[in-house]
Amino acid sequence: MIKNVLSDIGGVGLYGVISISLFFAVFIGMLIWACSMKKSFAQKMSAQPLHDGEKKAEPKGVSHE
């Protein structure tokens, strides 16, 4: 039944071509972006999951000024 429904839709083959083209365009775009990013930015972003944005409490009597 589904085969008959899809065969009755005009231009259904075009959807496959559009979807694979869109996939490759996004993939190539991300590849170019990843290759062109600065190493310092990549290292900074790779450490992000390890930091929650809050400063750690320092032990009493210890100052880092």
Image (cartoon, grey):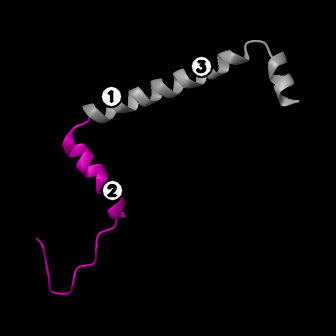
Tell me which residue sits at (33%, 56%) in the image.
48
Residue 1 in the image: x percent, y percent? 88, 30
Q: Nearer the viewer, residue 62 or 32?
A: 32
Q: Nearer the viewer, residue 37 or 3?
A: 3
Residue 27 in the image: x percent, y percent? 43, 30
Tell me which residue sits at (35%, 32%) in the image.
31
Would residue 60 be counted in the magenta stretch?
yes
Q: Which mark is residue 32?
A: 1
Would residue 26 be counted in the magenta stretch?
no
Q: Residue furthest top?
A: 10
In the displayed structure, would residue 49 be above or below residue 40? below
Q: Which residue lies under the disc numbered 3?
A: 18
Q: Is residue 59 left or right of residue 16?
A: left
Q: Amino acid at mark 2?
A: Gln
Instruction: State which quadrant residue 16 falls in.
Output: top right
Q: Amino acid at mark 3?
A: Ile
**Span colored in magenta:** 37-65
Q: Which residue lies under the disc numbered 2?
A: 48
Tell me which residue sits at (39%, 32%) in the image.
30
Q: Amino acid at mark 1?
A: Ile
Q: Residue furthest bottom?
A: 60
